[in-house]
Structure formats: C-alpha cells, structure tokens
Amino acid sequence: MKLKIANTFNNELPSDPIRENTRRKVFNATHSYVLPKVPSNPKLAHASKEMAQNLGISEEELQSEEFLNIFSGTKVYPKTKPYAMAYAGHQFGNWAGQLGDGRAINLFEIKHNDKRWALQLKGSGETPYSRQGDGLAVLRSSIREYLCSEAMHHLGIPTTRALSLMLSGDDVLRDMLYDGNADYEKGAIVCRVAPTFIRFGNFELFAARQDHINLKKITDYTIKYFFSSLGKPSKDTYIKFFSEVSQRTLEMIVHWQRVGFVHGVMNTDNMSILGLTIDYGPYGWLEGFDFGWTPNTTDRQNKRYRYGNQPNVGLWNLLQLANALYPLVEDAEPFENILNQFQKDFDDKSLDMMRSKLGLQLKDSEDSKLIERLEQCLLLTETDMTIFFRNLANCKKENSKNNLDSISEAFYKPEELKDVVIEQWQSWFNAYHQRLKIENLSDIERKEIMNAVNPKYVLRNYMAQLAIDDANKGDYNLVDELFQVLKKPYTEQPEFEKWFAKRPEWARHKVGCSMLSCSS
C-alpha cells in the first residue's frame, strides 16, 4: 500500500519538545508526538470504498493486513510521525483552558488528485491531552460517528469523513450516562478524514496565553493551505479569513436546520475552521419537530445546544474566534461588522432554505409569515419533521379538504388531530395553496425540487442503536445496510422503505435512542 504522504502540519508548525506521553500542559507548540496504543486483536468491521478511492487506496488494499495494521494503530506508516493536536475551548459557554486531542491521534496527510486529506484515529489511546480520559472509544460511539459522518456527506452537508471502523479486541470501561453505573464495552477505532482538523480552539489556545507568535504561525499556516485565495498574510487577509470562516459556519448550520440535525455539543473546540461538522458525539435528528430539543443529557437542564439555538451558538462561537484573532488585527470594528452581518445573512439564508423545503422558488414578502404559521402547526401535536416535509411534496397544487391525508404518516398521536388542531392545519394549507398559485411549477416539478432538499432517510438514533445492538453480537450486516441506505438519502429506495418511518414507541425513552451523553 503506497500512500502519497504530504505532511505539512507537523512539518511546518512547532512541536512539543517533550516526547513522553504524560498528561500535562503543553506550551509553545501546536502538537505533541505520540504513538497509538497497539490493540490486542484488531479486526476490520467496515470500510468506505468511496473514501478509500479519494485517498488512492484500492479495494484490494482495504482488505490487506497492512491496511488493518496502519488504521488500527498497530503499526506506524513508514517515515511518518503520529501526533495529537493542542487546542483550547469554551465548553457550554465557559472557558475550559487547554483541551487538545484527548482520544484522537493524527497519522499523516495525503495528497491525492490535488486534494489534501488529514487522517486521524479516534479511540487509539491516551495523549498528553487526555486529562482524566483513557483515550479509547467504544464500539457504540464509533458506529455512530462512522455512519453519521458519511450520511452527512451524502446529505450535502459539510462534514469530516470516515474511512474505516475497526474493533480493537479490547474492552473499555464506560459510564454511559455519568450516573455511576460503569460497565465494560467493546473497544473500537474510527479513522476520520478531513482536509484538516483545525478548530476554533487551536487559535483560542495561543490567544488566551498571549502567545501571539504561535497564534500568527497557525493562522498563516491555515490560510496558506486552506484559504490561499485570500492572499498573503496581512491584517486585511486575517479579516477576510474570519469573514470566510463565518460564512462557512453559517452555511453549515443552515444545512443542519434544514434536515433537523442537532449536534449536541457545539463547544468551540468542536467547531471546524473549515465549517465542517466535526466530533459526532451526542448528536441526533429531530423526530418530533421541536425547537427546544437536544439529545445531550449533559445539556438537559439549560438546553444551550438545543435545535432552535444552534444559529445563536454558532454566532457566539464566532465571537470567541474573533477575540482570538483580534491580536493579529488590533481593530475590533471589522470583526463586529462581520458578526453583525452573520445575523442578517442567517435570517436571509434560513428563509431561502425554508422556501426550498416548501417548493417555493419565487420570493414573496409574506413567506416568513407562512413559515411561522407552519412552525406553529408543527408544534400543535408531535409531528415527525423528516416525514412531514418529505410527504408534503405529495400535496397537489389544487386545494383539497383532504390535505391532512398527504401528511398523516407524520403524526405520532393522530388521535390529537381534532377540532382546533385540524382547523389550524387547514387554515395553513389554504394559505399554502394560495402561495403555490404564484409559482410556475407543475406538481411533478415541485415534488422533484422538494425531494432534492427534504431527505427521505436520515440516521435516526434508534436506527443507529439497532445497528449497535447487532454489532455487539458480532453481526455487522445492519451497519452495512444503513451505510448503503444513507448514501442516497433523497432517493425513494423502495427496498428500504422500512427505514422511512417514525421512531418506534419502544425507542422514545431508551438510552441511545433519545438520551445520549458526551461519552456517546
């Protein structure tokens, strides 16, 4: 297996001079060299042929012993030096100081077909940044990350990717809900892939320490390799850089809102500088439409990272990044202008996104009211977001008394559809049909447009949990089935119709299906 190694991060940026793998504060360095923990009995559970192809790895090589050794952490690829990144961050709104890659080890970078990829192993052992953790990951969380990162890519959402899912052969002790009931689970390792894993927190670390020399180094490096069109480093370039990161972050969150994805733990150390969805922990998709929902048990009281608050948190996180970059510019006004623009741009793009979900191509001044009334209807009784928007495309242009029939599958408690609820829905449908008259689209054309933005298949938590349950018994068929289904989320795929269904009642309060922690 000959990989096109093209390391830059650890070649061009300052490394930690201490080579012992002990937990500690690391200064004047962007990374620490560390070797992955050798697993006792690694086995390949699943691999992405598509991602392998992007990296120049053949299908035959995926099944090789060399692939197993390199991407389980058993062996280090020749002439490479694995490392863990140093970064800091705000967690749940509070400054947490130094964090870093506590259970991720970067292997190397590959450049293939003019695209740069960084590869890292998650769950491959402790690093200087592991704090109280063991640096390992369990099969449960690894399956969730592996399936979700690829599913998000096929939904058209900016994301890190996944190459492989390995069993380590080792048992890992985990307290799933932080309630004192720890138990052993199967250990696993995911190979994550992205152009870079640099986060907002990489910049915050040096800014907080007033280490402006290394702050400039990592900023210049990031611009050089990932924002090169902005030009050579200068104050003006740093402002353009922040503006570009702001736009990418905005677009990512608009996509999240479009499909009902809730990240669950939007700390600044979990915010990619490229605007990629990163760190799949206690995430979830909305089942019933609910602005106040979060899947993260750790956040249950304050619900900081709830679905409806994700845009606000994105803006708050960008403010922290602006504070970190400020020493390079020494002028607050341009940052403030960009942050103010974020709010306006988000409102505009969010409105356009909702128009697309309703099959509206033209803009009308009353659209925001129509959307607001729809959101009120969706909250009248528990209504499945994915099924509602997908089936709304079946609604005919001509008004009908049977409008609710087209979306009836979306209701969790159909017995609640009576009196005022029906009246309010019918009133909305009347307004929607009036609005459709402005459009120059046939029913077929509108359905096609709506189905291109409203997925039929998303990785509902109960689906992932079923795959996890089977995998814990050594059966990976369901992991593969979901992997295949989620490659074509906007396509009908009648052979997989069973996955186009509301969350089953047994999953409503089941751990892993409705309740998740950061250890997930």
Image (tube, grey):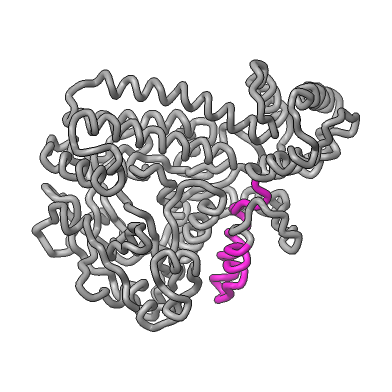
Residue 134 seen anywhere in this rendered image of the structure: no
Which sits in the foreground, 283 or 67?
Answer: 67
Q: Residue furthest top?
A: 365
Magenta region, mostly helix, strand or loop? helix
Q: Residue furthest bottom?
A: 65
Q: Position of residue 172 (x, y in %)?
A: 39, 67
Residue drawn at x 38%, y 59% is: 193
Q: Is 3 situated left or right of 32 in this image? A: right
Residue drawn at x 42%, y 69% is: 187
Q: Is 79 situated left or right of 275 in this image? A: left
Q: Position of residue 352 (x, y in %)?
A: 58, 29
Q: Residue furthest right?
A: 401
Residue 129: image quadrant is bottom left
Confirm whether the magenta stretch covers residue 229: no
Residue drawn at x 82%, y 40% is: 406
Q: Is 372 situated left or right of 88 in this image? A: right
Residue 195 seen anywhere in this rendered image of the structure: yes
Confirm whether the magenta stretch covers residue 458: yes
Q: Is residue 467 above or below residue 379?
A: below
Residue drawn at x 85%, y 33% is: 403
Q: Position of residue 338 (x, y in %)?
A: 35, 24
Q: Is residue 353 above or below residue 506?
A: above
Which quarter of the figure is the N terminus placed in?
Answer: bottom left
Which sits in the foreground, 33 or 102?
Answer: 33
Q: Is residue 276 above or below residue 9?
A: above
Report the span colored magenta: 455-484
